[in-house]
Amino acid sequence: MSKDKDPYSKLKKQLHLARIIYHIPNFIKLSLRLLKDKRVSFFPKLLVYGAIVYFLSPYDLLPDFLIPFLGYFEDIIILIFCLIGLVKLSPPEVVEGHVKAIDIENKQRYRFFR
């Protein structure tokens, strides 16, 4: 076993993936809140709405019927990148306020499980 190889690297990767999966509902809530917020400019919202139209559109860069798995995967990746762009292009104080509100909602909703 080499010294530079971490014996727990596989476990760390699995835990990192688990954390990402755990936060997906919160990220969706944040995205929906930012889309409704009037303090967020029009361009980031247009980016997301364009990605949704592209996702639902029968026309794709990689057609779904030619390459079934990759065609759908490409649609989802574009939508995810546009949602990340929405969060990054929104004013930081607006994002921070919504993140705190979502955290408070989660603490109230799941207070019996803690």
Image: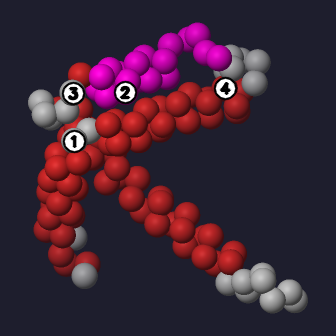
Taking 83 as reference, is 106 left or right?
Answer: left
Please identify the residue farthest to the right as the structure is shown: 1
Q: Kindly indicate whether the residue at mark 4 contacts the one at mark 1 (C-beta within 8 angstroms).
A: no
Sequence-wise, the earlier of marks 3 and 2 is 3
**CA gap, disc 3 to disc 2?**
12 Å
| Location of mark 4 (residue) | 71
> Residue 92's x, y, as percent?
23, 48
Q: Which mark is residue 41?
A: 3
Q: Which kind of residue does numbered mark 4 sit on?
A: Gly
Q: Residues within 10 Å of mark 1 (few under 14, many from 20)?
A: some
Q: Which of the labelled discs sits on residue 48, or is there none? A: 2
Give the foreground label among 4 and 3: 3
Residue at image location 26% in from the left, 38% down from the top: 90
- Residue 109 screen position, x and y as percent: 17, 65
Left of 15 or right of it: where is 30? left
Query: For residue 102, which numbered disc appears in the image?
Result: none
Q: Which residue is mark 1?
A: 91
Estimate how packed mark 2 is, as few (under 14), some (14 to 19) or many (20 or more) residues with alpha carbons within 10 Å. Answer: many
Furthest residue toward top: 59
Q: Which residues are magenta?
A: 43-61
Whether tag 3 and tag 2 are in contact, CB under 8 A, the answer is: no
Inter-mark Cα distance, 4 to 3: 31 Å
Earlier residue among tags 4 and 3: 3
